[in-house]
Structure formats: structure tokens, C-alpha cells
């Protein structure tokens, strides 16, 4: 496959919004890593908190977005990690500005 980490991140950025915050999860800093090999895509990500009520929906949206955008991937997996624990400092400058965090 000729899919890059950036391609996957851009697909997620364009489609997966945290419903509680209203911004995409890439700019929120929730996507920690993307691995692409010959047939699969693995996304390491976190949530804003372990008890995030939108967590199951966000995970579902990530998997389905990536599967639709890259049908040549035979497997798409999302791995939720808690280290490092997410904090607002992980957000992009754009996201911080949108939320009024300076």
C-alpha cells in the first residue's frame, strides 16, 4: 500500500470530531501514532479522559473513516493508550485558538 501516516491523519482530521468539544481529534492531539504496513493500518490514540462518554463513538468513527477512505487495507485497528495521559498542551495551535486557550 502507498498510504502514509499523513494520509491517515488527514482522513481522520477531515471526518472525526469529538462531539463534546466540537473539534477534530487530530488537532485535539488524540492521535498518537499511525502505522501502515502491506495490508493493515494501526492507529494509536487516546481519549480526553478514561471515562469519556463519547469514546465508543469516536473509536467507531475512526475505524469506519479509515476503512472507507482506504479500502485496500484488509485490517484497520484502533489501539487506545493512556500513556502519556492527554492534556490540552497536546492540542495544535489552531485548536487552542479555537477554544480560547493561550
Image: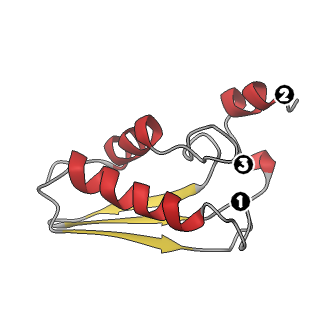
Residues under numbered marks 1 and 2 in contact, where contact means CB atoms less than 8 Å apart: no
Q: Residues within 10 Å of mark 3 (few under 14, many from 20)?
A: some
Q: Is residue 26 above or below residue 94?
A: below
Residue 59 is situated, as x and y percent measured from the top left of the image, at 47, 63
Q: Percent position (x, y) of residue 71?
A: 14, 54
**Residue at the spot 22% in from the left edge and 65% down from the top edge:** 37
Q: Residue at x 29, y 47 (%)?
A: 4
Q: Residue at x 32, y 42 (%)?
A: 7
Say which label, 2 or 3, has the lower sequence index: 3
9 left or right, relative to 83: left
In this view, the mark in front (2 or 3): 2
- SS label for mark 2: loop
Residue at (16, 48) in percent of width and height: 2
In the figure, residue 27 lies in which quadrant?
A: top right
Q: Which mark is residue 90?
A: 3
Describe the element under mark 1 as helix, strand or loop. Answer: loop
Q: Quadrant of residue 99?
A: top right
Q: Earlier in the sequence, mark 1 or mark 3?
A: 1
Left or right for 80, reference 38:
right
Task: Measuring from the top left, give residue 1's x and y in whole percent.
Answer: 13, 54
Please name the residue that numbered disc 2 is placed on.
100
Q: What residue is disc 1 on? A: 48
Secondary structure, mark 3, is: helix
Amino acid at each position: 500500500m502507498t498510504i502514509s501516516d499523513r494520509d491517515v491523519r488527514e482522513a481522520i482530521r477531515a471526518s472525526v470530531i469529538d462531539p463534546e468539544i466540537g473539534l477534530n481529534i487530530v488537532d485535539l492531539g488524540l492521535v498518537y501514532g499511525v502505522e501502515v504496513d502491506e495490508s493493515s493500518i494501526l492507529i494509536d490514540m487516546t481519549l480526553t479522559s478514561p471515562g469519556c462518554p463519547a469514546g465508543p463513538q469516536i473509536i467507531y468513527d475512526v475505524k469506519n473513516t479509515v476503512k472507507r477512505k482506504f479500502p485496500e487495507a484488509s485490517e484497520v485497528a484502533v489501539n487506545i493508550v493512556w500513556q502519556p495521559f492527554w492534556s490540552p498542551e497536546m492540542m495544535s495551535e489552531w485548536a487552542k485558538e479555537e477554544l480560547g486557550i493561550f
